[in-house]
Structures are given as structure tokens and as C-alpha cells.
Image (cartoon, rainbow, N blue to C red):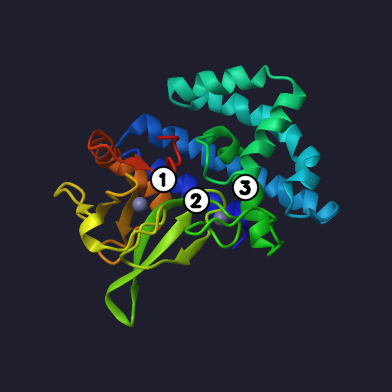
Amino acid sequence: MATEDEFGRRAARAAELVRDPGAATDLLRFAAALLSAQGQAASAFAALHALEPLTGDLRTDIDRLIPRLSPFLKLVAEKAPPELAEEALRRSAEAAETVRGRLLAWWDAPGSGEDYLSRAFLRPYLAVVTGLSLPVPRRRAPGHCPFCGGPPLLSIRRSAPESEAGSRFLVCADCGGEWPFGRVRCPSCFEESPDKLPVFQTDRHPGVRVEACEVCHRYLKSIDLTVDARPFPEVDDLLSIAVDLWAQEGGFARIAPGVAGL
Ligand SMILES: [Zn+2]
Ligand SMILES: [Zn+2]
């Protein structure tokens, strides 16, 4: 499936979930607009690649991507929650050199900052280049994405014939790729002792769990696709924002914020 369609299907899922009773409608509307803009960007980047191949290295490709940055920031400024919208507005006034510097700083240190806007802008670029299997020259910290070096956005469990409870995969925040990861292991500090890795769950969201770590105080939200095979975890993630707020009140920080920037 073309990368553009993958974003389009996620956008459609977000638009559909807006009707869910109790859904965070503002966030889902923003996610629908963002995912659809990312789909258009993915299609534009694929067209650039057809004209002259992209390399997979942002340092080489950046000048070809930057013309799309200002329409992207405009969209975020119009549709995002207030804090993010203000940040997008501030950035649209920045000098070209600052803009380049920011994107490259994000590129060079995967998962280290909370630069949501750089991630959201470059997500379709990374989806396109990893989809083409181009080598992405970024640092691969342990626990990060083998395709692009990005941090995990979510943990998912899928049915697997060899394990009744389902296998655990991590989903990349930067490119959307998935890779298998040990069931009892913190992807941030690699703690493996089960009594340091509490799992929290609420009755309201039976398929969602907080996989926390008492050593590094980070957490991942886990979505169980063996209970409910919802097709797009990164979108469905937005239905259980209350679970994130609760984990954060408990002193845990999410490894990477979700699609809508929270
Ligand atoms: Zn990745
Ligand atoms: Zn940890």
C-alpha cells in the first residue's frame, strides 16, 4: 500500500472516532487534519523521489523538503490545541537558518527532545524513505526503531500462534515502523525485573495498559490488539488520554508524546 494511503486511512479512522461518545473530539479532529496533511506530504515526497532519488539522509535531502514546512506550520497553527498552535505560529516567523538547525538537531538526537513539530513534519519523509528501504543514517539507541532510530510511541500486542497472550511489538514515533520487543523489558532503561515494571489498567479502557518503569519513571501505553483488533493504534491511542493523564499524575513520563502532541 502506498504510504500516502496509510496516512489517509489513519485520518479516516480519526474522523470516524470523533463520533465516539466521550472521545476527545478536538484532538481527534486535529489528528484527522494532521494525518491527512502528512499523507499529502508523503505523496509529494514520493513524487520528488521519482524526479530525483531521495537519499534517506536529512542532511542531503533537507532543502527539497523545506518548501512544505510553511504550509504544514500554517495547518498546525489553525487546527492544533492552543499551546501547539502558538508554537507553530512562532516557528513560522523564524529565519531559514533557525528552521534548518531545528530539524537537523531533531534528526541528530532521536527521542532526546520533545520537538513534536519537527517530528510531525518529518514523519512522512521518514515513512517514505523507510518504505523505500533507504538506509537512514541516524543513531540507533537500544530500544529504538531499527529502521530509523526513532523512539517507541506505543507498545502493541498482536495475536501470535506461538504465544497465547500475544506478542509485544513497539511502534516507532518517527517512521511508524513496528518491531518485536521482549514482553517484560523497559525500552528506555532495559530493566527486566517484573516487580520494577508495574502494569496499570482501568475498567474503562480494557484493551489499554500503562507499562511503567519504576527505575527510569517512563511509561509506554500498550494497546492490546488481541482483545480488540482496532486497526490503527496511533489513532485509537487518542481515545484513552485519561489513562495518560493518570500515569503522568503518578509521576511517570511518556517516552514519546502521541499523534496529537500529548
Ligand atoms: Zn522508525
Ligand atoms: Zn525504565
Precedes in sequence: disc 1 or disc 3: 3
Residue 179: x and y in percent read 48, 65
Q: Residue at x 44, y 43 (%)?
A: 256
Q: Which residue matches tag 3? A: 124
- Residue 207 in view: no
10 Å neighbourhood of mark 2: few (<14), some, or many (≥20)?
many
Q: Which residue matches tag 2? A: 151
Q: Secondary structure at mark 3?
A: helix
Precedes in sequence: disc 3 or disc 2: 3
- Residue 161 in view: yes
Foreground disc of the pair 1, 3: 1
Identify residue type, mark 2.
Pro
Precedes in sequence: disc 2 or disc 1: 2
Q: Residue at x 49, y 52 (%)?
A: 9
Quadrant (top left/top right/bottom left/bottom right) for the N terminus: bottom right
Identify residue type, mark 3.
Pro
Q: Which residue matches tag 1? A: 255
Horizontal side, residue 164 vs residue 149: left or right:
left
Do labels 2 and 1 touch, CB within 8 Å?
yes
